[in-house]
Image (cartoon, rainbow, N blue to C red):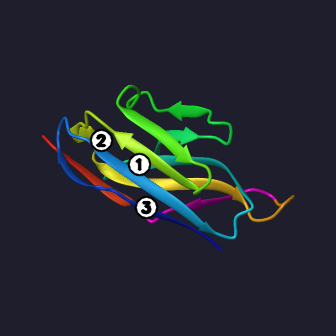
């Protein structure tokens, strides 16, 4: 069983910053990609940023230049530094990880419980 525990959400004014953290724990042999997704009310969940095992990074166009994803491989933790926040960034942010529980196993995906980010105008 693998769990992702997120923290760092909250309420911030437009132009402000927040830092999200997500720690993975449980039966983990290796983690390939970790990332952040978000879902605003009435909208589909969308990718925000991902970081792979080789530190290859992908950002949604809407957050490029404002958000930075990073990862502590030793701690199985991923971070999302969010700067210059806009009201349209308001959403529930979900952490995601693709992992293998033992050597040679297929890869599985797990989601965190989500953390609310609210940006006021």
- Dot 1 crowding, Cα within 10 Å, few <14, some 14–19, many 20+: many
Q: Are marks 1 and 2 in contact (CB under 8 Å)?
A: yes
Of the two numbered discs 3 and 1 on the same chain, state the one appearing first in sequence: 3
Determine if the magenta segment contains residue 15: no
In the rendered structure, which segment of residues is drawn in magenta? 106-113
Give the left or right position of residue 25, taking residue 88 as reference. Answer: right
Spatial distance from mark 3 to mark 1, Cα to Cα? 13 Å
Q: How many marks?
A: 3
Q: Which residue, given by chain and number where applicable, does mark 3 sit on?
A: 6
Residue occupying image coordinates x 32% and y 50%: 91
Which quadrant of the view contains residue 81? top left
Specify the label residue 91 is tagged with. Answer: none
Of the two numbered discs 3 and 2 on the same chain, state the one appearing first in sequence: 3
Which quadrant of the view contains residue 9? bottom left
Q: Are marks 3 and 1 in contact (CB under 8 Å)?
A: no
Spatial distance from mark 1 to mark 2, Cα to Cα? 9 Å
Specify the label residue 38 is tagged with. Answer: 1
Spatial distance from mark 3 to mark 2, Cα to Cα? 17 Å
* Whole-percent x, y for residue 8 in the image: 33, 56
Q: Which residue, given by chain and number where applicable, does mark 2 sit on?
A: 89
């Amino acid at each position: 069983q693998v769990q992702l525990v997120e923290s760092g959400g909250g309420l911030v004014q437009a132009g402000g910053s927040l830092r999200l953290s997500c720690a993975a724990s449980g039966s983990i042999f290796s983690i390939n990609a970790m990332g952040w997704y978000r879902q605003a009310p009435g909208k589909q969940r969308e990718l925000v940023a991902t970081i792979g095992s080789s530190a290859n990074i992908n950002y949604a166009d809407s957050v490029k230049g404002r958000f930075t994803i990073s990862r502590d491989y030793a701690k199985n933790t991923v971070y999302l530094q969010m700067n210059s926040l806009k009201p349209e960034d308001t959403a529930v942010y979900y952490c995601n990880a693709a992992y293998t529980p033992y050597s040679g196993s297929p890869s599985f995906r797990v989601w965190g419980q989500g953390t609310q980010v609210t940006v006021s105008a």
